[in-house]
Image: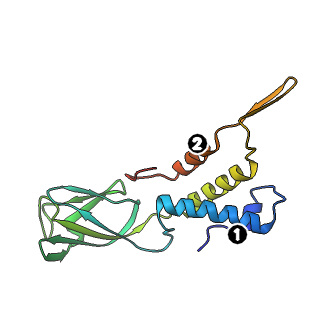
């Protein structure tokens, strides 16, 4: 599902570019968001398989709204954990509890977590708009001067990276 239409973009941006050109900018921005942060997750479950051997805590990539299930595997034995076997902290951290139904001090070999991530759709839309504005307004110059007037622009790739970094959350790695 596309984040924005060209009509929606034009409510945030003044441009005389053709609809097809605006669509290419939207597509490029959305592709970069997905490349760096994964598919849009509004309304869909996220599944992550994490290594847990010897750890009390495991970390997911997106903030958790609700946990659907946690399956812990030790060797070839998989156990679906009860809600009292783990605790979620700071929306990214899942702690193994030693006093639950399937109590253990640390996580098993693998931990498969299925959860509803907190929606970041609105933030993704803002980033997409900002990336499109940057592309439309990019002059291709570092600076210009005429008489007493002078103007300096930021470096395009650095500004683009800064806009994208505003979406980073949790423990993900930014390129």
- Secondary structure beneath disc 2? helix
Which quadrant holds residue 158?
A: top right
Task: In the displayed orientation, state which residue is furthest to the right.
Answer: 147
Which quadrant holds residue 100?
A: bottom left
- Residue at screen point 50% across, 64% down: 119
Location of residue 102 in the rendering, given as x and y in whole percent from the top left corner: 13, 70
Which quadrant holds residue 85?
A: bottom left
Q: Is residue 155 above or below residue 20?
A: above
For residue 109, say whether it is visible: yes
- Secondary structure beneath disc 1? loop
Q: Is residue 106 left or right of residue 45?
A: left
- Residue at screen point 73% across, 46% down: 138
Whether label 1 touches label 2, CB < 8 Å: no
The alpha-carbon separation of the residues under discs 1 and 2 comes to 26 Å
Compare marks 1 and 2 and give the one earlier in the sequence.
Answer: 1
Number of numbered discs visible in the structure rendering: 2
For residue 8, say whether it is visible: no
In the picture of the structure, the residue carrying the numbered disc 2 is: 158
In the picture of the structure, the residue carrying the numbered disc 1 is: 5
């Amino acid at each position: 599902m596309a984040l924005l239409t060209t009509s929606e973009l034009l409510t945030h941006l003044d441009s005389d570019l053709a609809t097809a050109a605006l669509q290419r900018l939207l597509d490029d921005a959305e592709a970069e968001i997905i490349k760096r942060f994964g598919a849009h997750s509004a309304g869909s479950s996220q599944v992550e398989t994490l290594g847990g051997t010897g750890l009390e805590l495991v970390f997911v990539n997106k903030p958790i709204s609700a946990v659907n299930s946690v399956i812990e595997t030790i060797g070839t034995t998989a156990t679906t954990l009860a809600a009292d076997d783990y605790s979620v902290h700071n929306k990214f951290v899942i702690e193994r509890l030693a006093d639950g139904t399937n109590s253990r001090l640390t996580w098993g070999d693998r931990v498969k977590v299925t959860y509803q991530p907190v929606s970041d759709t609105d933030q993704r839309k803002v980033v997409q708009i900002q990336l499109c504005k940057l592309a439309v307004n990019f002059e291709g110059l570092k600076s210009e001067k005429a008489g007493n007037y002078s103007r300096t622009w930021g470096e395009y790739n650095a500004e683009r990276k800064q806009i994208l970094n505003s979406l980073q959350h949790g423990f993900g790695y930014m390129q």
